[in-house]
Structure formats: C-alpha cells, structure tokens
Image (cartoon, coloured by chain):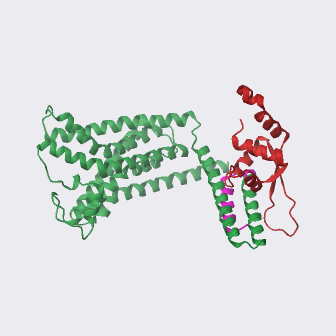
Chain colours: A green, B red
Amino acid sequence: VSAAGRRLRAIARRLCQPQTIEQVIDPVLADARFEFEDAIRQRRVWRACRLWLAGHLAILKVVAILAAARAAEAAHVPTPRERHALLDTLAIGTVMATASIVVLALVPLFNVIEPLHVDSARLLLLLVPQAIPIGLPVGLTFGVLLGVGRSGVTWRVRAFIFIFALVLSLVSLTLLGQVVPRANQAFRVALLGRDVPKGLNELSLPELHQLRRPNSAPRSGLSLPSDGDSVALAYHTRLALASTPVVVTLLALSWIGRRPRSVLMLAVGGAITLFGYYLSMSGARTLAQQHTLSAAAAAWTPNAMAIIVAVALVATDVRCWVRDSSTIDGR
Amino acid sequence: MVSRKELLILELLVHSEELYGLQLVAASQGRLKRGTVYVTLGRMEQKGYIASTLENAPPNAGGLPRRIYTATALGRRMWRTWTSGATRLVPAVAK
C-alpha cells in the first residue's frame, strides 16, 4: 500500500468501525494495489499511473462517503430535550430580534420626521435593513442564553446554533455590503425630495474596497471625508459587524457552558454582554477617529476581545469538567 | 428493499459465482463505479445478501489480500424474487 493509501486508511480508521475498515476500505486498497502491480508487470507505465490515480480517487471517494454518513449520523438530533432547546432558542431569538429591529428603525425615524408624516411607513421600511445587522446579534444572544442556558447545552446543540449563526453572519454581510447602502441612499432621497451625493454609509462594500486602493481615481457625485482612514474604518467596521452574529453566539455559548443558570442571571448576562460589546465597538471607533488606533484594529478589537473572553470561559469550563471527572473517578 | 445497484451486483454474482470488487466494476460495463461499489458491497454483506472471503495470496506477496464476493442463498432468493415476472406484475409482492 502506498504512503497516500496508508494516510487515507488512517483517516478512515478514525471515522469508521474496524468492521467497516475490513469490509470497505481494505478491499479498495487491495484491489487498487493488485491492478497497479498488474500494469507494472506488463510494463504499461501510463496505465499504471492512471490506475494509481484512479485507485487513490476511489479510496478518497469511499472515505468521503463514510465521513458524510458519519456526519449525518452525528447531526441527527434525537432527544426531545435538544429539540425543545433549539425551538426555544429560535422563538426567543426571533422575538428579541424583531423587537430590536423595530425599535432601532423607529428611533431614527422619530428623530428626523413627524411620526404621522405621510411617507413615514415607506421611510420606516427603508430604515429596517440598517437595523437588521444589529437586531440579529441581539436576538441570537438572548435566544441562546434564554433558550438553551436554562437547561444546559450539549455539543450537538452548540454545533446547530453555531451553523445557524454562521448563516446569519452571511445574511448580515449581504445586507451590509449591498442592501443597507442602497436603502440608506433611498431614505435620504425620499426624505429630502431631491438627489443627494452618496456618503460613506451609502457606498456598497465593493465600492468602499475600490476607494481604499491607493491609486483609485476620485469619483464624482460623492460626499466623502478627505482622509483615507475614514474609508478604511467604514470598510472594516462593516466586515466586523457582519461577523458579530458568530462572535456573540460563541460568547453566549461559552458562558452558559454545561451548567443550567437562572433566567434572571441569563437575561442580565445577555444585556451586559451586548452593552459591553457595542460599548467597546464605539470606544474603539473613537480611538480610530483620533488616530490612536488603526482603522482595522479599531473595527476588529471588540470581536477579538469577545473571542478571547469566550476562549477563557471555555477553558475554565473544561478545567471544571476535568476536575469533576477526576473527583468522580477517585470515588 | 433492494436498490438497483444491489440487484445488479447480485445478478453479476449469481452468474459468475465469485468476483473481486474491480471485476464487478468491469463486468457492469460502467454501471458500477469503483468509488462506490465497495460501500454498496459492505452494505450488502451486512444485510446478508453476499458473503466475502479473503483470497489466498502467495506467501511472498506483500500488502493486503483481495476480497472475493459470492452471493448467499438469501441474496440468490432475493434476486430471483425481484427479477421474476410475478414481482413485476404484482408490485405488492416486492414489498
């Protein structure tokens, strides 16, 4: 068996039962070797090379099929308790996200126009996209904490929630990259009743990226700050904001750990988490505007801090688990 | 329930008595792929439709021995049931 074949067999051994290795992996390897050696005996070098490649691809395919079967088995949610926790997370998260989005869209609306303005419904709709990337992390944080934090969380539930947060981050990225800038510009035009030059918040992510290039040509019809740092800050802030659903989910999951906690404690914890996160975001932004921090560092600092805290919490949880296990073993 | 691939493998084994995995791929004329045939063979062995033995390799041969597959009595009966005219005429029999 070739070195590559041995490596693939070693991977398969981690994924499968010994019986599966015997029945599925070993026959592939044996047949591929036999076919290859037969071609060599006949001095058909090109055929041997082709068979060597086909044999290894076949092994790879078998390992991939077995890995997919194993993943599907692991992803299955069998316990009613886990299903219940996930549904609770979804329900609480949806309610909290919707409430946050409505509030975040209404506040700027009341600041700029009379509440009973004839176009207020349309303007409110145009303000909704910019509220979603902030509403989603709020919903996720409270959804995770109150949905699964009361009963303790299993690794399978963690994986489901993390994948869901990843999808929401992609939604957020699409919104911040394309939808929010267009909605912002439409809001400004609708409010003033005339064409308005675009500012930084009205440029799409690719447009911001293009502006960051050192030799980018100046574009007409834009109202932009003269320094390049503001453009870089806007660009990095959008990317960092898009990753917020994943970051706050990691933080929330690491905090709840395996032990159940009271609702009050979880709600207060969620509020503190979000307040701290957005406060650090605002603080870092101020430091960047004062040129104390670089734009990239300012935009990503809150996420980096949150991940460090999450890792520390997980490490503590694991230490407790190891200590508890050794205590039980010692009895 | 027997899949189309499983039926094909049973058909080949019923007619040829015993075959290696790659011989099955060659005999199927492209209907079986070398990347998936072993997974199907493993599943069929677990169901009891086929049995396998390791070849008696010469003493100086290195590497893993090849696996030879044969249809079991259950596999032969299953193949006959599925391919008989009665099964085609009365689908309920097949279930």
Judge by depth and name the residue closer to the eye, A68 or A266: A68
User: Is A326 placed left or right of A121 in the picture?
Assistant: right
Task: Look at 33% across and 36% down and name the residue there.
Answer: A98
Residue A17 visible somewhere in the drawing: no
**Magenta stretch holds residue A4:** yes
User: Is A245 placed left or right of A237 in the picture?
Assistant: right
Residue A225 visible somewhere in the drawing: yes
Q: How many marks?
A: 0
* Residue B29 location (% of width, % of height): 71, 52
Judge by depth and name the residue closer to the eye, A70 or A192: A192
Bounds of the magenta segment: A1-22
Name which quarter of the figure residue A43 lies in: bottom right
Name which quarter of the figure residue A262 lies in: top left
Judge by depth and name the residue closer to the eye, A281 or A199: A199
Magenta stretch: dominant SS? helix
* Residue A129 location (% of width, % of height): 28, 43
Task: Look at 37% across and 47% down and name the residue there.
Answer: A171
**Magenta stretch holds residue A84:** no
* Residue A178 location (% of width, % of height): 30, 50
Q: Is residue B28 above or below residue A11?
A: above
Task: Look at 16% across and 35% down and name the residue there.
Answer: A119
